[in-house]
Amino acid sequence: MHKKNLLLFICICILNLTFFSCKKSTNKNINTLNTTFPGFHNINFNTIFTQSENHASNDNLIKNRLNNYFSQIWEGKKLSGGVLIARGNTILLEKYTGYTDVNLKNPITSTTPMHIASVSKVITSLAILKLVEAKKLTLDQKVNTILPSFPYSEISVKDLLSHRSGLPNYAYLVDDPKIWDKKKELTNNDILQIFTTYKPELLSQPNTHFSYSNTNFALLALIVENITKKKFPEALSLMIFKPLGMNHSYVFQKKDFATATPSYYANGKAYKFDHLDLIYGDKNVYTTPEDLFRLSQAMYAPNFLNKDLLNLMFTPYSKEKDGVKNYGLGMRMKILKNGKKITYHNGWWHGSNAVFVHLIDEKVTIIAIGNKFSSSVYSAFKLTSLFGDYPLPMVETDTYKSDSINILLNKILDTKDNSSLGNTNEDTISIIHK
């Protein structure tokens, strides 16, 4: 009996040792993943900016004009969404209006994730650049060395990031019923398969011409998945959202159909999801102005990304035509005649509109997100004139131009009484939907 009890005791001890050994091994793997998985870790938000970068002598005047802007344009035009403008760590304006559900009258708040459409491209490009920094791939690497079935051997990762691949937009290709049945939901892998199977003709030879195409960033999402061995939503969570404390940000997936903040037509009718709504990389990041502000702050941190890589992101590559407009790596820019540069990205998808402006020189962030379609959301871009010499000549317009809004903006932003705020001699606003 004594021997039997002794044997039982030994067996229990062995089982316990095995369990704790496995648990310790599992925890070690988790810790290793958290510390070695490429991402934007260890950003100290308290030390990014100096005191002079957090404040300016004319901030009170700017705050007054920003409040006028919000009351007259956002509230006056009954926009739905949120806007946040900051200098360094100092928020100069943060306000919300409208509803997440127009029927239930649930108000939009600072924790309401909204679809930022093509502003998602900024985040996709940062994931790629972080993988480049980690030496998991190179910018000049050919896409088909990562995605073997990709049929265009000369297109590089950098060509995708800078929209210089020549690839046609997948959204137009799948309009052909011979290529895709719109009753079926399209995925990123389906896009790759369509290009593999049909090999549509390039719009131009790689790296010879700028041509904005959502296909580029849908493929970049697949590259992130291939390199990280994670699905794109999880990869962005591990690389960007969790490390930066973007706690209300996610990449839309099928499981989110019932809970995602809907978007609306201008008349208040809700948009229905369609066959393109599961594609990510080019769109489908849902976030808040506060979370996007976290990202913009982090981008100024010295350890955010290798300085040379970050500079490449803000370098213009679409130089075939002279003009103000240009494109870097996942970032739009306007190169003004006075040498000033505005780095930004706009977005539009269904009823969602978004503006993300990152003023490098002034350490200023301008964010606007709307979930009920209105081109007035893009008026936030013109707020750049409050922070520096951004006269914005030759800014493009389109059919959504509103002279009444432009006149109102010019009155709000008129800086004749304080020239240090910048010059606003342009009477149009920038509208770039994607």
Image (cartoon, rainbow, N blue to C red):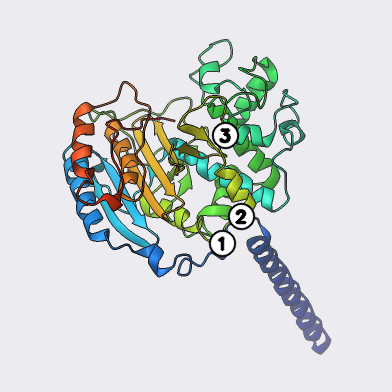
Quadrant occupied by the C terminus: top left
Residue at (31, 20) in percent of width and height: 399
**Which residue sits furthest bottom?**
2
Q: For the point 28% across and 63% down, which residue is it?
A: 57
The quadrant the N terminus occupies is bottom right
Instruction: Depth check: give the residue in front, 63 or 182.
Output: 63
Q: Secondary structure at mark 1?
A: loop
Q: Which residue is mark 1?
A: 302
Q: Nearer the viewer, residue 374 or 407?
A: 407
Between the C-alphas of marks 3 and 1, the distance is 26 Å
Q: CA distance from mark 1 to mark 2?
A: 8 Å
Which kind of residue does numbered mark 3 sit on?
Answer: Phe
Q: Which mark is residue 307?
A: 2
Q: Are marks 1 and 2 in contact (CB under 8 Å)?
A: yes
Between discs 1 and 2, the one toward the N terminus: 1
Q: Check the image and report above or below for 197 versus 339.
A: above
SS state under label 2: helix
Residue 217's mark? 3
* Dot in front, 3 or 1: 1
Give the image quarter of residue 64: bottom left
Dot 3 or dot 1, earlier in sequence: 3
Q: Residue at x 23, y 31 (%)?
A: 268
